[in-house]
Image (cartoon, grey):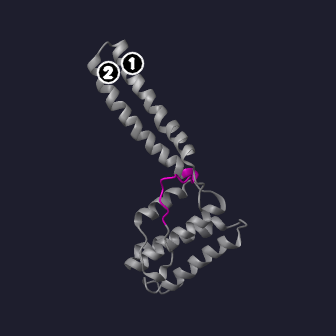
Amino acid sequence: MEGDRLSFFKWLGLALLFIGLPTVIAVVLSFSIPYYILHNLTLANTLSTIIPILVSIVSATYFKRYLQSRGLITPFMKRVSITILPDSGQPIDEKYIKSFEARLKFTKGEEYIKQLAMLGMMYLQNAVAYNNKDLYLRAKEYLARAEEAMKGKSVSFETKMLVDNLKSKIETYRYRFGEGKKT
Protein backbone atom coordinates (compact mmCIF):
# COMPACT_ATOMS: atom_id res chain seq x y z
CA MET A 1 0.00 0.00 0.00
CA GLU A 2 2.97 2.26 0.63
CA GLY A 3 4.47 4.05 -2.36
CA ASP A 4 8.04 4.97 -3.20
CA ARG A 5 9.53 7.92 -1.35
CA LEU A 6 11.08 10.49 -3.68
CA SER A 7 14.30 12.24 -2.81
CA PHE A 8 14.21 16.02 -2.85
CA PHE A 9 16.17 16.21 -6.12
CA LYS A 10 13.95 13.69 -7.91
CA TRP A 11 10.89 15.61 -6.73
CA LEU A 12 12.46 18.88 -7.88
CA GLY A 13 13.25 17.42 -11.29
CA LEU A 14 9.70 16.14 -11.72
CA ALA A 15 8.25 19.46 -10.52
CA LEU A 16 10.39 21.39 -12.99
CA LEU A 17 9.34 19.03 -15.78
CA PHE A 18 5.62 19.10 -14.96
CA ILE A 19 5.23 22.67 -13.71
CA GLY A 20 8.31 24.75 -14.54
CA LEU A 21 8.72 23.86 -18.21
CA PRO A 22 5.07 24.41 -19.22
CA THR A 23 5.02 27.70 -17.28
CA VAL A 24 8.17 29.01 -18.97
CA ILE A 25 6.82 28.03 -22.39
CA ALA A 26 3.53 29.77 -21.55
CA VAL A 27 5.36 32.95 -20.49
CA VAL A 28 7.44 33.05 -23.66
CA LEU A 29 4.54 32.32 -26.00
CA SER A 30 1.99 34.52 -24.25
CA PHE A 31 4.33 37.51 -24.41
CA SER A 32 6.00 36.89 -27.77
CA ILE A 33 2.94 36.32 -29.94
CA PRO A 34 1.03 39.49 -28.95
CA TYR A 35 4.17 41.66 -28.81
CA TYR A 36 6.09 40.61 -31.93
CA ILE A 37 3.22 39.61 -34.20
CA LEU A 38 0.43 41.97 -33.11
CA HIS A 39 2.74 44.75 -31.79
CA ASN A 40 0.53 45.32 -28.76
CA LEU A 41 2.48 45.75 -25.51
CA THR A 42 -0.59 46.05 -23.26
CA LEU A 43 -2.06 42.81 -24.54
CA ALA A 44 1.33 41.10 -24.25
CA ASN A 45 1.75 42.15 -20.61
CA THR A 46 -1.79 41.14 -19.70
CA LEU A 47 -1.60 37.75 -21.37
CA SER A 48 1.91 37.04 -20.09
CA THR A 49 0.52 37.40 -16.57
CA ILE A 50 -2.78 35.55 -16.81
CA ILE A 51 -1.86 32.59 -19.03
CA PRO A 52 1.23 31.43 -17.05
CA ILE A 53 -0.77 31.55 -13.81
CA LEU A 54 -3.47 29.34 -15.33
CA VAL A 55 -0.87 26.99 -16.83
CA SER A 56 0.89 26.75 -13.45
CA ILE A 57 -2.34 25.84 -11.66
CA VAL A 58 -3.30 23.21 -14.22
CA SER A 59 0.24 21.80 -14.26
CA ALA A 60 0.40 21.62 -10.47
CA THR A 61 -2.92 19.78 -10.39
CA TYR A 62 -1.74 17.36 -13.05
CA PHE A 63 1.56 16.88 -11.19
CA LYS A 64 -0.30 16.04 -7.97
CA ARG A 65 -2.49 13.52 -9.78
CA TYR A 66 0.60 12.00 -11.42
CA LEU A 67 2.24 11.51 -8.04
CA GLN A 68 -0.94 9.96 -6.63
CA SER A 69 -1.41 7.63 -9.57
CA ARG A 70 2.15 6.32 -9.23
CA GLY A 71 1.96 6.11 -5.44
CA LEU A 72 4.96 8.43 -5.06
CA ILE A 73 5.56 10.13 -1.72
CA THR A 74 7.13 13.58 -1.82
CA PRO A 75 9.65 14.80 0.76
CA PHE A 76 7.04 17.29 2.00
CA MET A 77 4.21 14.86 2.69
CA LYS A 78 3.49 14.19 6.29
CA ARG A 79 2.79 10.62 7.23
CA VAL A 80 -0.80 10.06 8.28
CA SER A 81 -1.46 6.97 10.31
CA ILE A 82 -4.96 5.89 11.08
CA THR A 83 -6.35 2.97 12.96
CA ILE A 84 -8.94 1.05 11.03
CA LEU A 85 -10.98 -0.59 13.73
CA PRO A 86 -14.77 -0.22 13.56
CA ASP A 87 -15.12 -1.19 17.22
CA SER A 88 -13.15 1.89 18.30
CA GLY A 89 -16.01 4.29 17.57
CA GLN A 90 -13.53 6.84 16.20
CA PRO A 91 -14.45 8.24 12.76
CA ILE A 92 -11.97 8.47 9.90
CA ASP A 93 -11.58 11.83 8.19
CA GLU A 94 -13.73 11.96 5.05
CA LYS A 95 -10.96 13.71 3.08
CA TYR A 96 -8.64 10.77 3.78
CA ILE A 97 -11.24 8.29 2.55
CA LYS A 98 -11.84 10.34 -0.61
CA SER A 99 -8.11 10.47 -1.37
CA PHE A 100 -7.97 6.71 -0.86
CA GLU A 101 -10.87 6.33 -3.30
CA ALA A 102 -9.06 8.51 -5.83
CA ARG A 103 -6.03 6.21 -5.68
CA LEU A 104 -8.32 3.24 -6.30
CA LYS A 105 -8.65 4.27 -9.96
CA PHE A 106 -4.98 3.64 -10.55
CA THR A 107 -4.57 0.26 -8.85
CA LYS A 108 -4.88 -3.14 -10.43
CA GLY A 109 -4.88 -6.78 -9.50
CA GLU A 110 -4.59 -7.90 -5.92
CA GLU A 111 -3.76 -4.41 -4.67
CA TYR A 112 -7.17 -3.29 -6.01
CA ILE A 113 -8.93 -5.97 -3.94
CA LYS A 114 -6.98 -4.96 -0.81
CA GLN A 115 -7.90 -1.32 -1.25
CA LEU A 116 -11.57 -2.18 -1.80
CA ALA A 117 -11.57 -4.13 1.47
CA MET A 118 -9.82 -1.30 3.31
CA LEU A 119 -12.29 1.26 1.95
CA GLY A 120 -15.15 -0.96 3.06
CA MET A 121 -13.64 -1.14 6.53
CA MET A 122 -13.20 2.66 6.64
CA TYR A 123 -16.83 3.23 5.66
CA LEU A 124 -17.94 0.66 8.21
CA GLN A 125 -15.94 2.42 10.91
CA ASN A 126 -17.57 5.74 10.02
CA ALA A 127 -20.99 4.06 9.89
CA VAL A 128 -20.49 2.81 13.45
CA ALA A 129 -19.03 6.13 14.66
CA TYR A 130 -21.84 8.23 13.14
CA ASN A 131 -24.57 5.56 13.38
CA ASN A 132 -25.23 6.09 9.67
CA LYS A 133 -26.91 3.35 7.63
CA ASP A 134 -25.88 4.91 4.30
CA LEU A 135 -22.21 4.49 5.22
CA TYR A 136 -22.95 0.91 6.30
CA LEU A 137 -24.51 0.21 2.89
CA ARG A 138 -21.47 1.75 1.23
CA ALA A 139 -19.24 -0.63 3.20
CA LYS A 140 -21.39 -3.52 1.98
CA GLU A 141 -21.03 -2.23 -1.56
CA TYR A 142 -17.23 -2.26 -1.26
CA LEU A 143 -17.38 -5.78 0.16
CA ALA A 144 -19.44 -6.92 -2.85
CA ARG A 145 -16.97 -5.27 -5.22
CA ALA A 146 -14.02 -6.94 -3.46
CA GLU A 147 -15.70 -10.35 -3.58
CA GLU A 148 -16.55 -9.84 -7.26
CA ALA A 149 -12.95 -8.88 -8.05
CA MET A 150 -11.69 -11.98 -6.19
CA LYS A 151 -13.84 -14.41 -8.19
CA GLY A 152 -11.76 -16.70 -10.34
CA LYS A 153 -8.48 -15.20 -9.15
CA SER A 154 -5.79 -16.68 -7.01
CA VAL A 155 -5.13 -14.15 -4.24
CA SER A 156 -2.80 -14.21 -1.27
CA PHE A 157 -3.83 -15.26 2.21
CA GLU A 158 -3.50 -11.66 3.40
CA THR A 159 -5.97 -10.40 0.80
CA LYS A 160 -8.44 -13.18 1.57
CA MET A 161 -8.21 -12.36 5.28
CA LEU A 162 -8.84 -8.65 4.65
CA VAL A 163 -12.02 -9.44 2.71
CA ASP A 164 -13.14 -12.09 5.22
CA ASN A 165 -12.52 -9.70 8.12
CA LEU A 166 -14.63 -7.02 6.42
CA LYS A 167 -17.39 -9.56 5.80
CA SER A 168 -17.28 -10.65 9.45
CA LYS A 169 -17.44 -7.05 10.72
CA ILE A 170 -20.35 -6.24 8.42
CA GLU A 171 -22.19 -9.33 9.72
CA THR A 172 -21.49 -8.19 13.28
CA TYR A 173 -23.13 -4.80 12.73
CA ARG A 174 -26.03 -5.83 10.48
CA TYR A 175 -28.62 -5.84 13.30
CA ARG A 176 -27.49 -2.42 14.47
CA PHE A 177 -28.36 -0.99 11.04
CA GLY A 178 -31.72 -2.73 10.75
CA GLU A 179 -30.84 -5.73 8.61
CA GLY A 180 -32.22 -8.70 10.51
CA LYS A 181 -31.99 -11.22 7.69
CA LYS A 182 -28.71 -12.54 6.44
CA THR A 183 -27.78 -10.94 3.11
Callouts 2 and 1 close, C-beta under 8 Å: yes
Q: Which residue sits furthest left?
A: 42
Q: Which residue is mark 1?
A: 32
Please rate how many residues cluster around mark 2, counting C-alpha atoms within 10 Å: few if below 14, some from 14 to 19, many from 20: many
User: In screen coordinates, is 53 left or right of 161?
Assistant: left
Q: Which residue is mark 2?
A: 44
Q: Which residues fall within the magenta stretch? A: 69-80
Q: How many marks?
A: 2
Say the numbered circle drawn on residue 113. Answer: none
Residue 65: x, y in percent? 49, 48
Mark earlier in primary sequence (2, 1): 1
Q: Describe the element under mark 2 as helix, strand or loop.
A: helix
Closer-to-camera residue (9/16): 9
The structure residue drawn at horizontal position 37% and vertical position 77%, both measured from the top left corner, is: 130
Q: Which residue sits furthest right?
A: 154
Amino acid on which the number 1 mark rests in the picture: Ser
Closer-to-camera residue (94/124): 94
Is residue 183 visible in the rendered image? The answer is no
